[in-house]
Each structure stands twice: as structure tokens, then as C-alpha cells.
Amino acid sequence: MGAPDNPRVVVCVHGLTRNGRDFDDLARALADDFRVVCPDVVGRGRSDWLVVKADCSFPLYVADMITLIARLDVEQVNWVGTSMGGIVGMLVAN
């Protein structure tokens, strides 16, 4: 949500049993000033399950988010995370 070319980006990552739609209201509120990206973590929301469910782990979530950030092509992002999403954010920042 928000202008796709806006360099000011907020990434919102949900908790373990939730999905990216949890941030719909927040995304609408921030959309005038930020590009807001609310992905579904693998195996949740509209994301596909992995063939080997044991592969769903923090290292994979972090790798996925780093790839997402690289594709956004911005210098930095702001992060909003609930529960698991907050942990993923701390790991990405590390």
C-alpha cells in the first residue's frame, strides 16, 4: 500500500499464527507517507506451504525477508512486527 516508488518503506510482519492482513488498518493509516509492505510468511495466509514443513524456521524467515528488502531497492526500512514478526525483525537487524 502506498506509492510503489516511495523510498520510505514500512515492512509489517505478523506473528506465528497470523497473516499480513493483520496490518490492513495500519497500512491504510501510513500509506500517505510510506510504502507499506505486509507479506505473509511462508506457510501462512496466502503463502504456500513448504514440502518439508520442518524447513519453516527463523533462518528461512530471515532469508525471505532479506530477499524481500533487496527487491524493494531502498536504503533502509522501518519494521513493525508482532510476536514472531518482531523476532524476525531483530534477527534481520542483527
Image (spheres, rainbow, N blue to C red):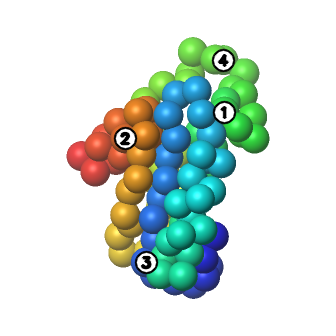
Q: Amino acid at mark 2?
A: Gly
Amino acid at dot 4: Val
Residue 56 in view, yes or no = yes
Q: Nearer the viewer, residue 25 or 51?
A: 25
Q: Which mark is residue 86?
A: 2
Q: CA distance from mark 3 to mark 1?
A: 26 Å
Label 4 neighbourhood size at 10 Å, few (<14), some (14-19), many (20+)?
few
Which residue bears the numbered disc 1?
44
Density class for disc 1 (Cα within 10 Å; few <14, some 14-19, many ≥20) is: some
Counting from the top left corner in percent of width and height, residue 73 is at 49, 74
In this picture, residue 48 sits left or right of residue 37: right
The image shows residue 41, relative to residue 37, as above or below, that is above
Q: Position of residue 74 (x, y in %)?
A: 43, 75
Residue at the image position 41 percent from the left and 33 percent from the top:
83
Question: Along the polypeptide, which appears first: circle 2 or circle 3?
Answer: 3
Q: Give the spatial CA distance, label 4 vs label 1.
A: 15 Å
- What amino acid is at disc 1? Arg
Whether residues under marks 3 and 4 lie with C-beta atoms below 8 angstroms apart, the answer is no
Measure the alpha-carbon separation of dots 3 and 4.
36 Å
Percent position of residue 14, x then y: 52, 41
Q: Residue at x 43, y 40 (%)?
A: 82
What residue would you read off at disc 3? 8
Q: Which residue is mark 4?
A: 52
